[in-house]
Image (cartoon, grey):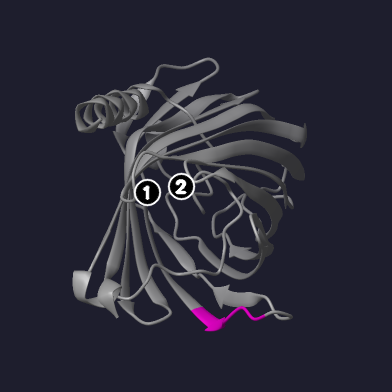
Amino acid sequence: MQRFSSILFKRSLTAALFFIIVVPVTVCAGPPFITDDPEPVEYKHGELYISSIYTDTKDGKTGTLPHVEFNYGVVPDVQLHILVPFAFSHPKDGPTSFGFGDTELGMKYRFIHESDNIPQAGIFPLVHLPTGDSDRGLGGGHVPIFLPLWLQKSWGPWTSYGGGGYWINPGSDNKNFWQLGWLVQRDITKALTVGAEVFHFSKQTTGGCDETGYNIGGIINLSEDHHILFSAGSDFAGDTRFSAYLGYQWTFGSKEEEKK
């Protein structure tokens, strides 16, 4: 059984690193979805993701190959976050570029815990540092900031979360915009959780349009610490024809905290 689990883990990890799948690159949120939740990583625990994303729009294709995301619970109810992407960009009528993309930093803070009648609530401000080459389509060339509020409530095997916030989006043709989303997911078994989300973005550029879309995905628990995450979707209204995500997640934590 141990040998079978080891083989399954290695094959799943290989698949996660090989395929290119995901959510729009401009907004990296709660893997494997765009919509995030208010629940931070537990104190002295961490999460490491190795993931790839792919987005196909009328203007071309973009994504990551891969990106690395790390979250850590520095104090109770507070999580620090960093995401470093190796990005690619293939404009419709241009050459494909590869290189580092914009680095994402954030801090999640949960200020209300969930009770029988009250959802948990938290904020998760994010900032994108312009570490990618914007001239080759690998970065934005500016420092956008996201200021969201997220809510979550669970009932047995069901969990629902969502909310949204405001993006401060500097740049000559850019516009500040709103991001909204909501998700429902269900634990099918201990090894599988599935979910679906709808999301909306207001205009991000002067000549742009609103975007409304969906993603369907899930989480496969290979063990207590190793997980595969996946999602795929499209726009109801907007420029994205297809987007998808596939990633591997390793969770770890302080053994002393787990015994308490």
Name the image quarter holding the N terminus.
top left
Q: Position of residue 42 (x, y in %)?
A: 37, 71
Residue at 62% from the left image edge and 49% from the top image edge: 173
- Residue type, label 1: Asp
Q: Is residue 140 left or right of residue 38?
A: left
Name the image quarter holding the C terminus.
bottom left
Q: Is residue 44 left or right of residue 233?
A: left
Q: Position of residue 162 (x, y in %)?
A: 67, 61
Residue 85 shows up from this direction:
no
Q: Secondary structure at mark 2?
A: loop
- Residue type, label 2: Gly
Q: Which residues are magenta?
A: 110-115
Residue 118 shows up from this direction:
yes
Q: Position of residue 63 (x, y in %)?
A: 45, 32
Rendered view: 253 above or below 113: above
The tag on residue 102 is 1
Nearest the camera: 196 or 30? 196
Residue at 36% from the left image edge and 63% from the top image edge: 81
Nearest the camera: 12 or 16? 12
| Residue 97, picture quadrant | top left
- Is 112 in the magenta? yes
The tag on residue 140 is 2
Specify which label sits upstream in the sequence, 2 or 1.
Answer: 1
- Is 56 in the magenta? no
Q: Secondary structure at mark 1?
A: loop
Q: Nearer the viewer, mark 2 or mark 1?
A: 1
Residue at 77% from the left image edge and 45% from the top image edge: 210
The tag on residue 133 is none
